Amino acid sequence: MSIEINANPQSDTAKENTDNSVLNLVRQDVIDMVAYQSARREQSGGTVWLNANEQGGNNVFSQPIEQLNRYPDFQPSALINAYASYAQVSTKQLLATRGADEAIEVLIRTFCEPGKDNIVICPPTYGMYAISAKGHLTDTTTVQLTSELQLDLAALEQQIGKCKLVFICSPNNPTGDLINQQDIIQTLKMFSGKALVVVDEAYIDYCMQASCVELLEQFENLVILRTLSKAFGLAGLRCGFAIANPQVIELMSKIIAPYPIAKPVADIASAALSSEATLTLQRDIKRTLELREEIVIELKVLPWVEQVFTSKANFVLFRTTDTQKCQQLFAFMSENGVLIRNQSKQLTLENCLRISIGSEQELNEFKRLLAAFNQTIS
Ligand SMILES: *Cc1c(COP(=O)(O)O)cnc(C)c1O
């Protein structure tokens, strides 16, 4: 397997292997493992955070916190009902999780036997699939996206019988575009009875008509992942969902933590899913899409920007003409307090930077610095 992950700043844990060290107890593969470099771990400081695809300002919900002496419901019904209605699925098809990240982890723990089973990922894509697999002694096979950033169906077909889970991210992070639904249908058919196809829809709220939910009726092996971290602007809440046929949900329910959703999380998430709040959400999404197109236009005219990737999500990936410009721009932004994400280490994404579509004010600062940087090199 070859997955490009940034160097681990904490890797010096491997050094002190003295007699009574905990390192004598831990699994060797955990010592060797490189932790996921989340945007928040990778860079600190800065004043304008455009590196983690969060949305700004969802602070409508501050409620008194009561009854914390009681354990919460395993799956808080107000939350499940509200999300079922938002996603237009039945409550039996839903599992609320600590972010979509926990759903990824629970899927692997439920379906992959450690040291035996494999997952398939289609890079360049989200990093956590491989990390979660590794933590569960599960190998990752990569079936690279084509040059059009679509599924390589012939290569996927080679994996039938050799994997338990196929992860497809649509809209894909960090490239931004949708995976063709016809190809997802082909993949579901191909792996029917052989593997689950997990479609990660973390960014689908920005292009809801492209969701795969309607395919759930037809395909028992489809699992969809959702989150409140992106369009809902609630990344700090840690709330996501798996949507699948009730049998898959029941199996995952055996493996997930006994009380995955804290009471305050359930309350805030339910409020964010009220019909009033989802109206505001639609307005915010529309604004984000407008701001995204403005950024695309800004980037496209720059002579040292070679490519601006099509995006259906709340971020834009772009490629500079050379490595030096990529590193210089990243450093220049960072020195001036604007954090963006360098994706150059990902398969096929040499010299690529990703900017999240934050607030208008944050993006104005980005644009101002972009113009200043452009001055220094022309
Ligand atoms: C952000 C992200 C996630 C994780 O979402 P959480 O709900 O915050 O855990 C999962 N998949 C993709 C593609 C993401 O970009």
Image (cartoon, helix red, strand yellow):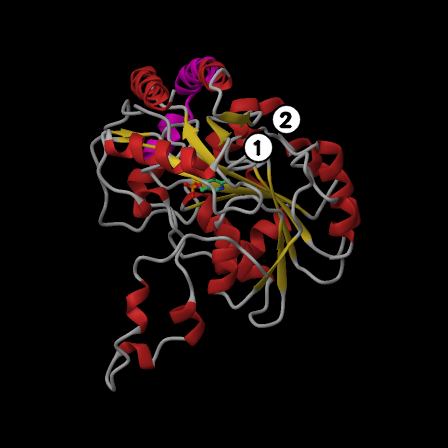
Tell how many labels: 2
* Residue appearing at x 73%, y 50% in the figure: 156
* Residue appearing at x 28%, y 80% in the figure: 17
Q: Are marks 2 and 1 in contact (CB under 8 Å)?
A: yes
Is residue 78 shown to the viewer in this render?
no
Foreground residue, 132 or 331?
331
Query: Does the magenta run of residues contain 270?
Result: yes
Q: Which residues are magenta?
A: 267-292
- Which of pointers 2 and 1 lies earlier in the amino acid sequence? 1
Q: Which residue is mark 2?
A: 210
Q: Which residue is mark 1?
A: 171
Q: How far is disc 2 from disc 1 in space, using C-alphas? A: 9 Å
x and y, in percent, of residue 103 in the image: 49, 49
Is disc 1 surrounded by few (<14), some (14 to 19) or many (20+) residues within 10 Å?
many
Quarter-of-image position of residue 193: bottom right
Q: Would you place residue 221 above or below residue 90 in this image?
A: below
Amino acid, disc 2: Ala
Q: Quadrant of the C terminus?
A: top left
Amino acid, disc 1: Pro
Foreground residue, 28 or 277?
28
x and y, in percent, of residue 91 in the image: 55, 38
Quarter-of-image position of residue 16: bottom left
Query: Does the magenta run of residues contain 179?
Result: no
